[in-house]
Image: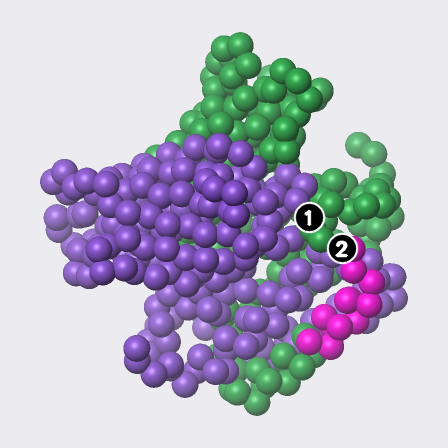
Chain colours: A green, B purple
Amino acid sequence: MTDPHPLEAVYEPLAVSVRKLIDVTIRTEADAAAVLAARQLIDTACEQLSVELMPGSFGLRTTPDGQGSAWGNVAIGIRNPVAPPLFVHHEPDGQVWTEFVLGAAYEGPAGHVHGGVCALVLDHVLGATAHQPGRPAYTGTLTVRYLRGTPLGPLRAQARVQRVEGVKTFAVGEITDGHGVTVQAEGVFIHPKQRPPLEAGPAA
Amino acid sequence: MTDPHPLEAVYEPLAVSVRKLIDVTIRTEADAAAVLAARQLIDTACEQLSVELMPGSFGLRTTPDGQGSAWGNVAIGIRNPVAPPLFVHHEPDGQVWTEFVLGAAYEGPAGHVHGGVCALVLDHVLGATAHQPGRPAYTGTLTVRYLRGTPLGPLRAQARVQRVEGVKTFAVGEITDGHGVTVQAEGVFIHPKQRPPLEAGPAA
């Protein structure tokens, strides 16, 4: 493990606060006056943070300052309040897994994770197992099979490489809750022979 | 068109403010003191909104108060700051389409939409075309084919029913940018014969 980047202590807690704010924004039953007062605080915070903004998205920063390139990523970005974020663990045998909790912000059917969010999680973990250091891969095809509804709450996702055929890596994985598998996926990932295209890399 | 629900004017602008805050949280280069000050405002807003919270997620509200059941939805929810949100238009012939803008919050590869977010959008619009009033459908399988990277910015998604076989509806759709199709999808949706299961309905 390397020491955390010093800017992590500045920006990560901000994203944690905003994640909590997202949850209560959806679930609040406060009255109109209280909501208006909260909005004014939020708008003021927004102005204060906007005094210095990088142009464009996080990945397009023109001055690399040592911040992790995936800090803005919608699945794993510690600076992105939309990301749960997923912390993806790599086992020595190439398998990957992540344990995470999805709350109200990821709802589709009542009390359940949106099927598209399941696809997002699986796209990311399948990509993480297909990607290898120095041998980036981009997603060609992803097939997601819904066995039953995935309840909001604590979940696990895992993936592994099934086989490799030339430039193609076939990966499979699933999401499980306390009662077993809810969603399965298989993905075909392409390793470009020349320099990586735009979709390359572990950032899916 | 029906008149908007009176609570829409209270809660929708709050979600709009939080969406803007999400974007600047990812992109800010303000110093540690400014970030700390902003966090304190955000935490205060969070406390004020938390004085009255519905238990659990939005869809599980125990007191239906006329708010749209999809207001908390991660794809289309006007109260969910994680949702772009998508506004899905239904044509008389059953086709659906939506035009939307994805910014820094949805990034995967630098400057591009995360492949999993493309899957989320397609899952939702394909589900919207397969679902019919009084005849809900749930997603059985979704296959997503990535033709090239989808740039952050203005995008369009559309979907249509290809064929119906018994309880199965086959839908296809795609995401396009200014230069054409970036991602294609096909989905198999199941119409339950008995009462709808948990994944049923247009909320995907």
Q: Quadrant of the C terminus of chain A?
A: top right
Q: Is residue B163 left or right of residue B146?
A: left
Residue A55 circle label = 2
Task: Answer above or below: position of B174 versus A139.
Answer: below
First in residue order: circle 1 vs circle 2: 2
**Residue at image location 71% in from the left, 20% down from the top:** A134
**Residue at image location 63% in from the left, 80% down from the top:** A38
Task: Based on the picture, tell me whether residue A47 belongs to the magenta stretch.
Answer: yes
Task: Name the image quarter holding residue B112.
Answer: top right
Looking at the rendered structure, the kind of residue marked 2 is: Pro
Q: Which residue bears the numbered disc 1?
A: A72
Measure how far apart labels 1 and 2 are at the Cα level: 13 Å
Which residues lie in the magenta part? A43-55
Residue A59 percent location from the top left of the image: 71, 44
Task: Based on the picture, tell me whether residue A78 belongs to the magenta stretch.
Answer: no
**Residue at image location 41% in from the left, 57% down from the top:** B98
Pair 1/2: label in front: 2
Task: Answer above or below: position of A177 versus A104.
Answer: above
Residue B181 percent location from the top left of the image: 46, 40
Looking at the rendered structure, the kind of residue marked 1 is: Gly
Q: Is residue A188 left or right of residue B63?
A: right
Give whichever of A139, A23 is nearer the camera: A139
Residue B148 percent location from the top left of the image: 53, 34
**Residue at image location 81% in from the left, 45% down from the top:** A62
Give whichever of B178, B4 is nearer the camera: B178
Give whichever of B202, B51 is nearer the camera: B202
Residue B32 percent location from the top left of the image: 86, 61
For residue A160, say whether it is visible. Answer: no
For residue A37, say whether it is visible. Answer: yes
